[in-house]
Amino acid sequence: MPEGHTIRRLARSHVRRFRGHEVAVSSPQGRFAAGAELVDGRVLRSVDAHGKHLFHVYEDDLVVHVHLGLYGKFSLTAIPGDGAVPEPVGQVRMRMVGSTHYADLRGATACEVLTEGEVAAVHERLGADPLRPDADPEQAWRRLSRSRSPIATLLMDQSVIAGVGNVYRAEVLFRHGIDPLVAGRDLGRARFDAVWDDLVDLLADGVRRGSIDTLRPEHADLRCHHPARRHDRTCGRPVYVYRRAGLPCLLCGTEIARRTHAARNLFWCPVCQSAT
């Protein structure tokens, strides 16, 4: 599932290509036909992102809400020089056509026109987003510090912190030496503050890069120089533990562990992230 930095990049690209212009909106697949008819030909006023949710705000305050889910894709393509937009390929839920680019949405969990009250309800149920300037870490701390649930569960709970997915969860816990199964209420304020600040930086870096790179600068030389990884196909992956189960920890050499946690794979180093 795309994490928060991907949705933020989508919002920025749609602002650059569509904001301030009339947008032709259609639903080649047909599942969004009624919603597309409501916004077709209207001016796109703004684009917002909150966690993994994307909001296109059209004139007259009509809002298209998109959540990509596990399989959603939002492509962006320049319109050819002759101005002819190609016919849709595959199951296109929503097509947006501007003056220079068109965008096709496929496979999204949600694509719907919401009222102002419904938009507010979506924001209300989401936690603080480290990428938003209005994010309130106090809100996240209150929810996390009262919970007996493992920190690994809470970081993936979008009502606690919005935008964190499986990769950022695994990596930020490793970067701070936190046992993924420690209860939220046992984390402590200082460690929470450090994790929050790190997520702000990591997600912002992901927006800039368009990819996730969690190795600290002092560990950059470990990408392909760990003796047990030199010829491994994952060499060069800029992460510490995510999808490295069975490989040695880049810092201590211990085998990276994996378990199913809340229906998702959880990765960690049993030594670097020991509870004791």
Image (cartoon, rainbow, N blue to C red):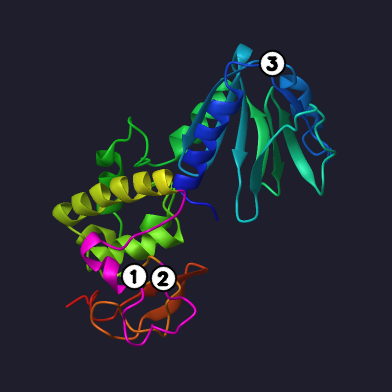
Left or right: 202, with 176 as reference point: right
Q: Which residue is mark 2?
A: 236
Q: Is residue 143 among what the camera can see?
A: no
The span from disc 3 to disc 2 (Cα, nearest Å) is 45 Å
Q: Is 86 within the magenta?
A: no
- Asked where in the image residue 95 lies, by quadrant, the reply is top right
Disc number placed over residue 30 in the picture, else none: none
Q: Which residue is mark 1?
A: 240
Left or right: 196, with 39 as reference point: left
Left or right: 187, with 119 as reference point: left
Q: Is residue 88 among what the camera can see?
A: yes
Q: Nearer the viewer, residue 4 or 247?
A: 247
- Asked where in the image residue 83 lies, by quadrant, the reply is top right
Residue 25, how many percent across, how many down? Answer: 74, 27
Q: Which residues are magenta?
A: 210-237
Helix, strand or loop for the magenta stretch, by majority: loop
Badge nearest the viewer, 1 or 2: 2
Q: Amino acid at mark 1?
A: Tyr
Judged from the image, the secondary structure of the residue bearing numbered disc 3 is loop
The span from disc 1 to disc 2 (Cα, nearest Å) is 11 Å
- Give the vertical position of 174 relative to 40 (above or below): below
Q: Nearer the viewer, residue 11 or 66?
A: 11
Q: Amino acid at mark 2?
A: Gly
Residue 212, how many percent across, how many down? Answer: 42, 56
